Image (cartoon, rainbow, N blue to C red):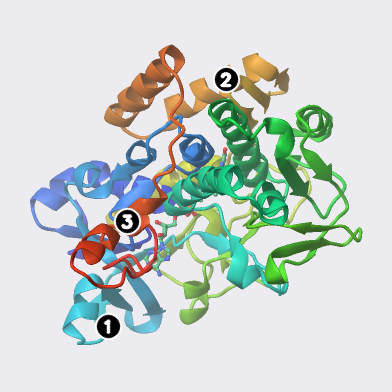
Amino acid sequence: MVKERARILVVGGGYVGMYTALRLQRNLKGELRRGEVEITVVTPDPYMTYQPFLPEAAAGSISPRHVVVPLRRVLGQCDVVVGEAESIDHATRTATVTTLATGEEKTGARRVTYDELVLAPGSVSRTLPVPGLADHGVGFKTVEEAIGLRNHVLEQMDIASSTRDPALRDAALTFVFVGGGYAGVEALGELEDMARYAARYYHNVTPEDMKWILVEASGRILPEVGEDLGRYTVTELRRRNIDVRLDTRLESCADRVAVLSDGSRFPTRTVVWTAGVKPHPVLAATDLPLDDRGRLTCTAHLSVDGAPHAWAAGDAAAVPDVTASEPGRECAPNAQHAVRQAKVLGDNVTHALRGEPLDTYAHTYAGSVASLGFHKGVAHVYGRKLKGYPAWFMHRAYHLSRVPTVNRKARVLAEWVIAGLFKREIVSLGSLEHPRAEFELAAGGKPSQDPPNNPKGSS
Ligand SMILES: Cc1cc2nc3c(=O)[nH]c(=O)nc-3n(C[C@H](O)[C@H](O)[C@H](O)COP(=O)(O)OP(=O)(O)OC[C@H]3O[C@@H](n4cnc5c(N)ncnc54)[C@H](O)[C@@H]3O)c2cc1C
């Protein structure tokens, strides 16, 4: 039983937002039924994205609908509001929220008051002022980007197959990925594998015609799996003819030419930017304390330091790592911490409402798994190092066990089994981004390039 009626506002419906809300609706079942507690989740999309599956979605091994979890279904006891928090004034316990409806009604943002705030907007791509990047680059953080990239790669193969211009063909078949963390390496590994397979069905495009380039500013890739496996990954990618350039930066991609710091130039129509993340900019529109990297300063109880009734975790939060041997270390921004922090966070909000003592977040990093394409991978988990097929199998088993809901697990498993029995899908459905083009042509109008009713410009 809580002391007073409490309105809990959860900002963000990703790992932290969804798992915290799940925990709260389980812990506070009785209070929710009696109307003593109300939980509102504000998030721009009505789904949580299981980001570790994005590379497989890009490769076509998992359908886009199965890498996301419908929030309205799993958060049956919460109010899910599809919208964005634009600013938060914690002093007055008020968030300013825009929704699809406020856009249509032109009434301006809505003010939402709360008693407890869980702030979990995650991170956004960390870009640099590289000329041409804003115009030609694409990130790899959302399901729209992953599917858009898959369609784009296949479309480039179609362009290369049908053009008579050798320069256009060369640019279409050159794919540049910037950043050698798991997002970049897995995205490149899976897409190259998919394109290599698709090339079997083209009469005039072979895997040798394609140039896949990985540009990494430091001297190593995949720091998450350790130095040895990082070195092995470089060797494995190079064996597949992927051009891995360490200690190299992208200096420009203006005019669709990727210029690298080692002086090389690659005309290309594809620049994928996965060079790290930074905390979500909405954090700067709050009156809550931020560290020098723009993350919310948190305690090991996952409360925002010095701001009673404000809580945070995940990529947006600087959480002390109490298991580290050196003092002052913080938890890395990854799903492993985000999921576990969300559980402690949900429990601590419950404890706070009931006047109970808070739990401390303590988790020793267990290691990482990464897929490099079909039957290829690396894994470093609990001190055990695996390569190739065993690592890939472990990657799949681990993520299958982690993806939320039995429904999603069953669907993903079914897709893997079917993909193992039949041939892989190789069509580009890029035209889905322009669903009215055919009708506009029939109606005698000029087909527009912008997808209708889609502010993100993606399918
Ligand atoms: C391609 C890829 C692969 C990855 N693979 C792994 C892996 O193998 N292992 C691993 O441990 N980690 C992995 N990660 C990292 C992991 O996904 C993140 O660390 C994790 O998602 C962080 O959780 P979060 O809740 O803080 O943020 P997110 O899960 O990103 O959730 C943030 C949510 O907040 C919403 N939001 C943003 N702004 C607002 C606003 N103004 N108002 C309301 N809502 C807002 C967003 O739309 C989103 O729903 C991967 C990441 C990527 C991109």
| Residue type, label 2 | Met
Residue at mark 3 to residue at mark 1: CA–CA distance: 34 Å
Quarter assignment of residue 119: bottom left
| Residue type, label 1 | Ala
Mark 3 or mark 1, whichever is nearer to me: 1
Mark 2, residue position: 394
Q: Secondary structure at mark 3?
A: loop
The answer to whether the residue labelled 3 contacts the one labelled 2, judged by CB atoms less than 8 Å apart, is no
Residue at mark 1 to residue at mark 2: CA–CA distance: 46 Å
> Counting residues from the N terminus, which is met first, the one under dot 1 or under dot 2?
1
Q: Position of residue 287 (x, y in %)?
A: 47, 81
Label 2: how many Cα within 10 Å (few below 14, some 14–19, many 20+) = many
> Counting residues from the N terminus, which is met first, the one under dot 3 or under dot 2?
3
**In terms of depth relative to the viewer, which is nearer, 115 or 332?**
332
Q: Is residue 290 left or right of residue 408?
A: right
Residue 345 position (above or below residue 199): below
Q: Is residue 132 left or right of residue 51?
A: right
Q: Secondary structure at mark 2?
A: helix
Q: Position of residue 167 (x, y in %)?
A: 72, 55
Residue 369 appears anywhere in the view = yes
Mark 1, residue position: 109
Residue 37 position (above or below residue 233): below
- Which residue corresponds to the image point at 32% horizontal and 40% vertical from the top-left? 65
Residue at mark 3 to residue at mark 2: CA–CA distance: 42 Å
- Which residue corresponds to the image point at 72% horizontal and 74% vertical from the top-left? 131
Q: Is mark 3 within 8 Å of ligand 1?
A: no
Label 3: how many Cα within 10 Å (few below 14, some 14–19, many 20+) = few
Q: Position of residue 410 (x, y in %)?
A: 31, 23
**In terms of depth relative to the viewer, which is nearer, 214 or 1?**
214
Mark 3, residue position: 355
